[in-house]
Image (cartoon, rainbow, N blue to C red):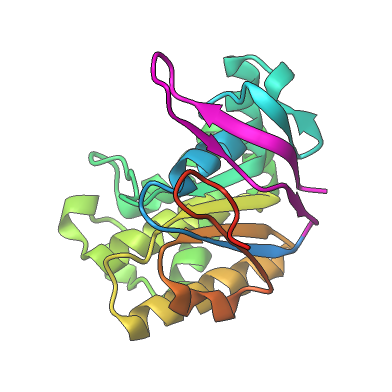
Amino acid sequence: MVINTKNLSWHWPDQGGSLHFPDIRLQAGDHLFIRGPSGSGKSTLLSLLSGLNRAVDGDIEVHGQDLKRLGGGARDRLRADCTGVIFQQFNLVPYLSALDNVTLPCRLSATRRRHAGQPEDTARRLLRALDLPDDSLGRKPAALSTGQQQRVAAARALIGAPPLILADEPTSALDTDNRDRFIDLLLARAADHGTSVVFVSHDPGLAAHFPHHLELASGGEVQP
């Protein structure tokens, strides 16, 4: 089991609001699509699953680890070793080349480095599979198009074959054709290593790419 949550909720510090999430059970290699409007807690849920934020109420196990019992350093290590994250704004390091951005997880995690084999060679193969031209590998993010930055972010998440990828609306800036093509490429690369993907979006048109669906309403409650 890659993800197992029960009665999970989130309360903002010093605020009265809270979000309540439906239970999730995701097996290795399965893909989950999470949809909901702004304010439904999609990004908050991903931050809890990644360990960026610590859950207080409910149960949350990721990679067989109880995230509520782990300190910040242990959650960071688990994420570095086992989870690739594609942020909505990509969060590429501006002073690193495309190639160096992709190999960065292998410098932060010995596990990812070991699974990647030769990180630079693996990064080049991933970027080519994601249709990034070879002449873009040495460019910094500011010199890349939005679609190219997106592919770099996806390759960075995929390198080292983490068992889980969390994607936070990474296709929001793309047109329909490029959006669908990107998702197909992402899922194909994930399938190569049995990687599970949790993909968050407000766009119902993406649901057909995923076998499992979860819909959040305002406040994080599951829709009937």
The residue nearer to you, when weighing 87 against 211, is 211
Quadrant of res 96:
top left
Magenta region: 1-28
Quadrant of res 191:
bottom right
Quarter the C terminus occupies: bottom right
The image shows residue 46 at horizontal and vertical percentages of 53, 43
The residue nearer to you, when weighing 86 against 56, is 56
The image shows residue 131 at horizontal and vertical percentages of 40, 76
Residue 156 lies left or right of residue 38; in this view the side is right
- What's the residue at 58%, 60% (across, down)? 223
The residue nearer to you, when weighing 119 against 111, is 111
- What's the residue at 71%, 29% (across, down)? 58
157 up-or-down from 35: above or below:
above
179 up-or-down from 28: above or below:
below
The image shows residue 156 at horizontal and vertical percentages of 47, 51
Is residue 109 something that shows in the picture?
Answer: no
Is residue 82 something that shows in the picture?
Answer: yes
Q: Is residue 3 magenta?
A: yes
| Count of numbered tags | 0
192 up-or-down from 108: above or below:
below
- What's the residue at 29%, 68% (across, down)? 147
Residue 166 lies left or right of residue 203; in this view the side is right
10 up-or-down from 213: above or below:
above
- What's the residue at 61%, 43% (across, down)? 21
Q: Is residue 2 magenta?
A: yes
The image shows residue 50 at horizontal and vertical percentages of 57, 37
